[in-house]
Each structure stands twice: as structure tokens, then as C-alpha cells.
């Protein structure tokens, strides 16, 4: 058993979380601490509950038991209205509004949550686009004119529009070629360092796990069965974790880590 971490160091504290649908229990007394300023990678079997965990943390799915604290504040109360500024989310497909330009997409959370002049919103949009490696001119484009990598960057700029301290990423590199995926990982690392972000990332990408994640958590049987730096996970004796990291498809990468 690992000791609970001191409160001030914890960005997301999950205790004894139980989540299910009908007769199915997906998360079964799951506990997890995400430390402030770290990039935590979450791995787990397909259908194992990674998305359910992320969605429950951000309040989209009700829980049957347990507690969740974000930056020391319990979530899930009826009065919990300040969520938009507490985290940004990058969903798997980028999910941009196709009828809005890139600039309008990035400005969407600003419009929804603040009252700002158009001039200021335009300045913010340019700053956010630059932050993710895009040019101000890209702001005039529509989502259909973007490559997969650019789409993810725009979605990231939108997720960061309100300067949240926490960023949730759902398989951020899926659908990108290895070079674009590597560039995106590097961007996440840079943003985490420069903005002091806490990043919670669901990913199957072994390269992301080994290069950008400070720690990796493994979800199996509805619980976190191993957590630590990648090197420690590779030593885990848990059968699912062993099968995941020591299976045929991951052997090549393993080789390079030794
Ligand atoms: N809204 C829902 N209603 C009913 N069952 C659901 C709902 N959302 C998820 N589930 C079930 O919960 C389980 C976990 O799903 P989840 O999407 O979290 O898996 P995952 O680990 O993210 O998988 P993948 O890696 O394939 O994305 C699945 O059995 C799924 O069918």
C-alpha cells in the first residue's frame, strides 16, 4: 500500500470511487492521486474504464460511491459552477465546431464564460494559437481545412483558452503519424513546464508513456493496480501490467529502454 500524499501536492484526489451502469461495476473502489504539475499517463484494457474514470472526474458521469477532490475542492456538488476555469479537456477526435473558424473555436469558451471586448478576444486567440505552434493566419481557417495534427493543436488552444491549471487529454496522439505524435508530445511537455500544468492523459501510445509521462497508472479490474514512473511499471508483477508492457507489440520499445 502506498501512503496518501500530502494535500497541497495533489491536483486530483480520487478515493474509493465506485462507478457502474446497471448491473455492471466499471470502477470498483478506485483510488488515485494526480500530483500538481505532473503529467500522469493512464493505461488500461479497452473497455476497462479509462474514459469512464476521466468523465467521472470531470463530473459527466455520476458516481455510486467515493469522493473526488480537484485542487482541494470536492467536486460534484450542485453548487459546483466554476468547472470551466478549473480544467481544459481535449477529446479524442478534437471535436471542433465545423461551422466556426479556428479563431471562433478558440474563443468559444471565452464567449461562454466571460464578457470581453472583441479586440481582447482576438488578442487572446492569437496568443493561444501561438502557444500551440500555429500562426495567427490559421485563425481564419475552418476545421475541414486542417490536418489531423493542426486539429489537435486547435483543440488544445481551445482547451487552454481560460488558463485552466489542469488539462485532460483523451488519447491525444491517436490518429497522428509518429512524427506529428512526437511533436504533439513535445508540445504537451513544453506547456506543462512553462504553464505549470497538471496533465491527466489517457493513452495507448508507448512512446508518449516513455517520453512525456512523469508517472503512469495502470487500470485493471476497476482499480489502479500499479502507479509510478514507467521504469517501475515495467517491473510490476501484476499479470495485466506484465501482459500489457511485455506483450509482443511493446517488446521493441522495451528493448530500447534497457
Ligand atoms: N454511458 C454509459 N452507459 C453504459 N455503459 C457505459 C457507459 N459508458 C461506458 N460504459 C461501459 O463502461 C465500460 C468502460 O468503458 P470506457 O469507455 O471507460 O473504456 P476505456 O477503458 O476508455 O476503453 P477504450 O480504451 O476502448 O477507449 C465499458 O464496458 C462500457 O461499455
Image (spheres, helix red, strand yellow):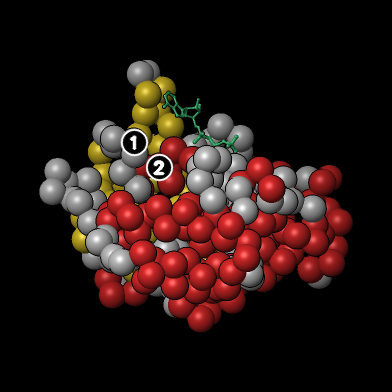
Marker count (numbered): 2
Mark 1 or mark 2, which has the lower sequence index? 2
Q: Secondary structure at mark 2?
A: helix
**Most extreme residue toward the bottom, as rendered?**
194
Ligand 1 within 8 A of label 2's CB?
Answer: yes
Q: Residue at x 41, y 22 (%)?
A: 24
* Residue closer to the observer: 95 or 12: 95
Q: Measured along the vertical axis of the image, is residue 229 above or below residue 1?
A: below
Numbered tag placed on residue 61 in the rendering: 1
Q: Residue at x 68, y 51 (%)?
A: 146
Answer with left or right where residue 208 lies relative to residue 177: left
Which residue has dot 2 on it? 55
Answer with left or right where residue 114 lies relative to residue 207: left
The quadrant in which the N terminus is found is bottom left
Are circles 1 and 2 on residues that touch, CB within 8 Å? yes
Q: Residue at x 51, y 81 (%)?
A: 194
Ligand 1 within 8 A of label 1's CB?
Answer: yes
Residue 17, percent from left and from top: 32, 43
Answer with left or right where residue 202 lies relative to residue 165: right
Residue 118, percent from left and from top: 36, 64
Q: Secondary structure at mark 1?
A: loop
Numbered tag placed on residue 147 in the rendering: none
Amino acid at each position: 500500500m502506498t501512503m496518501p500524499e500530502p494535500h497541497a501536492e495533489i491536483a486530483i484526489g480520487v478515493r474509493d470511487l465506485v462507478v457502474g451502469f446497471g448491473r455492471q461495476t466499471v470502477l470498483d473502489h478506485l483510488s488515485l492521486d494526480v500530483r500538481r504539475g505532473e503529467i500522469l499517463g493512464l493505461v488500461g484494457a479497452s473497455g476497462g474504464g479509462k474514459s469512464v474514470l476521466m468523465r467521472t472526474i470531470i463530473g459527466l458521469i455520476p458516481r455510486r460511491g467515493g469522493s473526488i477532490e480537484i485542487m482541494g475542492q470536492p467536486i460534484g456538488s450542485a453548487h459546483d459552477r466554476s468547472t470551466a476555469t478549473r480544467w481544459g479537456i481535449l477529446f479524442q477526435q478534437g471535436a471542433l465546431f465545423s461551422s466556426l473558424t479556428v479563431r471562433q473555436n478558440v474563443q468559444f469558451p471565452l464567449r461562454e464564460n466571460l464578457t470581453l471586448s472583441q479586440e481582447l478576444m482576438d488578442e487572446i486567440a492569437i496568443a493561444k494559437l501561438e502557444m500551440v505552434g500555429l500562426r495567427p493566419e490559421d485563425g481564419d481557417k475552418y476545421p475541414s481545412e486542417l490536418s489531423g495534427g493542426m486539429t489537435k493543436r486547435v483543440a488544445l488552444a481551445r482547451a487552454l483558452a481560460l488558463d485552466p491549471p489542469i488539462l485532460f487529454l483523451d488519447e491525444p496522439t491517436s490518429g497522428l503519424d509518429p512524427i506529428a505524435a512526437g511533436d504533439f508530445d513535445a508540445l504537451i511537455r513544453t506547456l506543462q513546464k512553462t504553464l505549470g500544468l497538471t496533465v491527466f492523459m489517457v493513452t495507448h501510445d508507448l512512446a508518449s508513456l516513455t517520453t512525456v509521462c512523469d508517472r503512469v497508472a495502470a487500470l485493471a479490474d476497476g482499480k489502479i493496480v500499479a502507479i509510478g514512473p514507467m521504469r517501475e511499471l515495467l517491473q510490476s508483477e501484476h499479470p495485466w501490467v506484465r501482459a500489457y508492457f511485455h506483450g509482443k507489440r511493446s517488446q521493441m520499445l522495451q528493448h530500447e529502454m534497457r
